Amino acid sequence: MASSVPILAIRDLRAHFHTRRGIIKAVDGISFEIQKGETLAIVGESGSGKTVSQLSYLGLLPMPPLRIAGGQAFFHDTDLIKAGKDKLRAVRGDSISMIFQEPMTSLNPYLKIGTQLIEPLCLHRKLSKKEAWKVASESLEKVGIADAARTMHSYPHEFSGGMRQRVMIAMAITTKPEVLIADEPTTALDVTIQAQILELLGELKKETGMSIILITHDLGIVASVADKVLVMYGGKMMEEATAHELFSASSHPYTTALLKSTPRVDIPQEVLPVIGGSPPDLSKLSPGCPFYDRCALRLDACKETAPKPCSLSPSHRSFCHLETVQ
Amino acid sequence: MSSTLVTTMDSSPEQAQLLTSTDDAGISPWKDAFHRLLRNKIAVCGIVFLIVEVTACIVFPWFSRYSFETQNLEAALSPPSAQYWLGSDALGRDLLVRILYGGRISLMVGVLATFVTVLVGVVYGAVSGFLGGRTDNVMMRVVDALYALPFVFLVIILMVFFGRNIFLLFIALGLTQWLTMARIVRGQVISLKQKEFIEAAHSMGISNTAIVFRHLIPNSLGPVIVYLTLTIPEVILQEAFLSFLGLGVQAPMASWGTLIASGVGSMEVAPWLLIFPALVLSLTLFSLNFLGDGLRDALDPKGAKD
Amino acid sequence: MGLRYLFGRVSIMLPVFIGVITVIFFMIRFAPGGPFDKEKIVPPEIMESLNAQYHLDQPLWKQYLIYLADLSRFDLGPSFKHANRTVNELIAEAFPVSLELGLWSLGWALLIGVLAGAMAALKPNSWLDYLPMSFSVLGICLPTFVIGPLLVLIFGLWMGVLPVAGWDSWQDRVLPSLTLGFAYAAFISRLMRGGLMEIRTQDFIRTARAKGLSEVQILFKHSLRGGILPVVSFLGPALAGLLTGALVTETIFNIPGLGRFFIESALNRDYTVVMGTSLLYFSILFVCNFVVDVLYVFLDPRVRYE
């Protein structure tokens, strides 16, 4: 797996917000790679920078206040960070598509679903409206919307959250993207709908061979769909592993804490442990590990020096001083 | 017709953030609001202008060499000079004194008509909100229906057919403006009736006095004061509008509207007769609108935050 | 948006309309002075025949019923002052002039307002934003009767490039329509900017960016429709404002439109003409507010009137 050439390779990405209150290092030194057909889950609490880590290199965040302070984002051979606005636009919605957390607000309420659905096709594939309408209808059928023809002529408010998320997915896959970035796609949905959407994403991946970057805070989801996992905290990488390695042999204290605080059906638990304290203020980070304040196993070194990555296997890296000490 | 919409426009979010970021504990909300208002430069400019203007309107005519009626036909239509600071009109009357006298009338109509507005609006809104249910529903339907009427036409008819009496004028103008006030007061009364936030405050152990001063008064009085400040320019504008058409204040009395109207008549030979009254009226409207906006931002940090 | 809504709407407006007719009717009749007071003393026989012709010899309630009966046939009755002319005829002459003026003004206002607002929203906090927004503050605070004379002074008298009065050539249309439209251009530009800025923060704009649309495509396809909604809801009040503003504009520029006609008739106590014109104004407002509501539904699919 590691031998093939990655579709998307992010190297040491740093995305900082320059605000009146100072520089907020929302993303600070993130690297990952994704191969064809792989699902990468990016896990972290809200505010850990997982969304920014994706939106920033796609140019979807307003600059200023955002500034890319460093790093590269290679999509095939193109560094998206150095690419111009037009080049980025050509990639967005064509080979890299996105779906978002809020299906209720992510669709334009003033336009018919069909009108919105055909946009990427007309724009990137230069299809006529009529052809695009046909392709888009098929894509609606693919995501399990029975009455596609009528749905195309409806407005978003006529549908439930789950249905809208299906529409969003249909819109994202019309152009047969190589990478689909799904930003908390199920967070706003009911549990039963969540399962359906995840299942749908899995099927589509199998069918089209696209890669998926799944941003989530829910380790339960990670376990069921992800191949690889990247754990983020305070804008920094904590641990990177295959899903199997993470759940069987997590190394970083933050990951361990996170796993412990996830409810499990298979192990009876009376009290769910929580991680004490609250996420750090990203404008006042020390040079050390951002998890220092809340870490149960912290060392003196953790406060002042940033931990170096420690390889536990070819696919497993942990950013923690504990590993280096042992 | 115009001024109230200024308030619904955005104030810049940075400014709003700046205004709200410093609400330190321990300062009473009114003091707090006052400080926020003082930090709003354009509102302060408005206040200063209004204070100067009102003082001048009251005091200056007493000390002036001229009364608003003093005619001097030999100095008719003289441009601004040391003798007539802002020039003189076709009858040789001093324009500055006439503007200040006109200001007395215009400002008085503005304040008195707004008083009528507050009186009617507060009573109507409070009764509607307090009674609630069907009565409230019917009373608000009436307000909705009245919103669709162009009151100016009714006022014109009233003024024409019942004589151009200044008391009639400010009552009529007051009666055109009370609808929004009634809505605001009703909303406040209803929200105070529910008092969820007051119960919440109780449960957090905040004393009654603190609740009254910290929550009730700012919450109910704020919007009324803000709307009141914005009604005054609206009424002044309406009065000037009617006077301009010859339907408001009658000679020999003058208001800014009649001064502008006569300025239009002689603007070819004496443009200052148009320009100065127009300038004073406009600056007054500006100041009151900016003050109203400033007050709204200062009194309603909630709204300003978004 | 069904028949039920339409029916409900009319069922609210009809009583208001009849109420207005009643109020104006009796207000005029109870006012001191009649339409023939100013005329030279006429022989009693002629006076009697005049009174008979206008039903003035009938008891008041009967006059009222006669008026309502005529009105139901869209007959506004004969004019009291213009011999042998009916109110319908007089309105038919003056109304097209006012309509043209109003359309020109609204056209200006929409064109300038929407463009300036969109420009400001595309580059917020740049001079493309500050410049039009400063102008709009001017436009909102300066009343028509100040802008009009100032435009006449500058373009008509000092520069001599445009005619200052009349309604014959196309040049005659420029200054009046600019005067009347300026304030609305100002409002519309602010509403447009505010609407677009609000839309810009919505999630679906991010979706559109993620699809690879350019900023211009996003503006026209995704933002404009929602962003223009505040402008659409403003069109109702704007129309009321245009009607009253036309009173002043037509007076300043000596335009033979409905507004000047209304003022003249009011001053002349031409009962039927005042009634007729007022009712026309109210009907126009009612119809246009209704059209605005329909337009709103068309633009925002989520809105349904019950």
Image: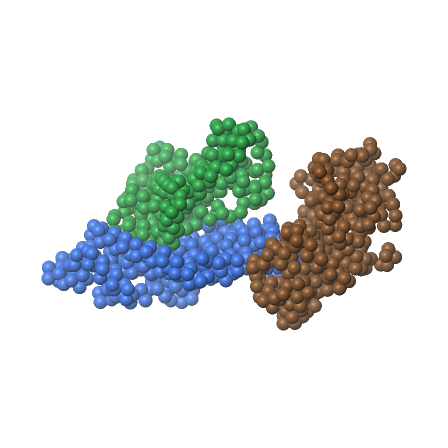
Q: Nearer the viewer, residue A52 or C188?
A: A52
Q: Is residue C65 left or right of residue A243?
A: left
What residue is at 59 percent from the left and 34 percent from the top? B22
As displayed, is residue C263 above or below residue B4?
Answer: below
Q: Is residue C153 visible?
A: no
What residue is at 42 percent from the left and 45 percent from the top? B183
Q: Residue B135: horizontal and vertical position, in percent?
A: 37, 46
Q: Nearer the viewer, residue C210 or A158?
A: A158
Q: Is residue A228 left or right of residue C39?
A: right
As displayed, is residue B52 above or below residue C254?
Answer: above
Question: Which quadrant would residue A325 be assigned to in this image?
Answer: top right
Q: Residue C201: horizontal and vertical position, in percent?
A: 60, 51
What residue is at 49 percent from the left and 31 percent from the top? B211
Colour applied to chain B:
green
What residue is at 33 percent from the left and 55 percent from the top? C16
Total marks drawn? 0
Who's brown, chain-wise?
A: A
As displayed, is residue A174 above or below residue B105?
Answer: below
Who's blue, chain-wise?
A: C
Q: Residue A166: horizontal and vertical position, in percent?
A: 65, 59
- Quarter of the image with the C terminus of chain B in it: top right
Q: Residue A35: horizontal and vertical position, in percent?
A: 81, 57
Q: Nearer the viewer, residue B4 or C139?
A: B4
Q: Is residue B169 visible?
A: yes
Q: Is residue B174 left or right of residue C51?
A: right
**What's the image's color scheme?**
by chain
Question: Which quadrant would residue A45 be assigned to in this image?
Answer: top right
